[in-house]
Image (spheres, grey):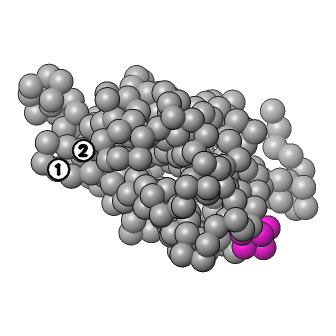
Amino acid sequence: MAEAARALVHGLEPEQLRMLGGRLDDPQWHEWTYLPGDRPGLPLADMSDDQRECALELLGSAHGPLGAQLATGVLQVERVRRELVTGAPVANDRYWFRVLGEPGGDAPWGWRVNGHHLGVHVVVAHGRMSVTPHFIGAEPAELPSGRRLLGPDEDIARDLLTGLDSGRRRVAVFSATPPDDILTRADPVADPRLLPEGLRYGDMTEPQQGVLRLLVRRYLDRAPAEYADQCWAETVEAGLDRIGFAWAGGAERGARHYYCVSAPNFLIEYDNTQDEGNHAHSVWRHLRDDFGADLLRLHYGTRHAAPPG
């Protein structure tokens, strides 16, 4: 990852470097959105082919194979969306990169990419990393070609819901009407109290528990395997029985719906409610380590004084 970041930095012109660079204590580091619009940073649209290749290599370095497919898939879906709106092929990708700190240096450093329906936030310190908030969206959720970027993320949750008996389903379904969006939105700090408790893992049958584990790993496996396994190990240690699953809206494919998964160390949200159920959002938040908070506490609390500013 450090090599990919350095390759991007070293291939830029001075004005591009000014747009790309920053510090981890920049207040804008915690400001993000998944809505359309400009962002701070260096946009892919202003990069040369070689620079763009470096940027996409950096994006891939924060992901396992599944996550890389999803992250680059957002760019592809967005091109289709814009072509459907304008009637013309898209000539640029409106996604902004920032590199904060010195890649591979002794101090913590990080980077992010943000744009419509894509938010990846990475911090690296002492050989460890964090990758959340991690947001993937798709508009349309189903392309004219039939491709569904987040199809498995939706289908696994639906399989879990439809596999519940009536009593358990009454606990899991908190509303017949889904919210219009994810409940945590782009809040700098994700508040798990915003999410309904739903049906607990410990109150499910073994087959239902297996589907919930599959759903959780679908999100964690966006990250490289080492980080995903670390997050899963934390979840197991905290107690799988404390994981909750909740649903709102219709159960049939194409119906507007929402679901969430809450655990002591993370939360997951998914909605497909806008555009008559053809506009999907998904987010994975780490309740202690969003924006590398845990890594930075470890670094500054046990190794160094806090950074100036």
Residue 283 within the segment the image draws in magenta: no
Q: Nearer the viewer, residue 38 or 184?
A: 184
Q: For residue 11, say whether it is visible.
A: no
Q: Residue at x 86, y 46 (%)?
A: 306
- Give SS at disc 2: loop
Residue at image x 10%, y 33%? 89
- Is residue 244 shown above or below 213? above
- Left or right of 44 on screen, residue 293: right
Residue 307: image x %, image y %?
81, 43
- The foreground one among 214 and 127 is 214
Tell me if label 1 and label 2 are in contact, CB under 8 Å.
yes
Residue under pointer 2: 142
Task: Give the total of numbered labels.
Answer: 2
- Which image quadrant is residue 43 in? top left
Residue drawn where x is 69% and y is 30% of the image: 27
Mark 1 neighbour density, 10 Å: few (under 14) some (14–19) many (20 or more): few
Residue 85 in which image quadrant:
top left
SS for dot 1:
loop
- Specify start and end residues of the magenta stretch as a single range: 234-240
Residues 46 and 257: in front is 257
Which disc, if any, is residue 47?
A: none
The quadrant where residue 278 appears: top left
- Percent from the top left, x then y, of residue 196? 68, 42
- The reply to whether residue 239 is in sight is yes
Query: Which label sits on residue 146?
Result: 1
> In the visual, does 248 lie left or right of 302?
left
Callout 1, which amino acid? Gly
Asked whether 237 falls inside the magenta stretch, the response is yes
Residue 233 location (% of width, % of height) = 70, 74
Q: What amino acid is at disc 2?
A: Glu
State whether the magenta stretch is mostly helix, strand or loop: helix
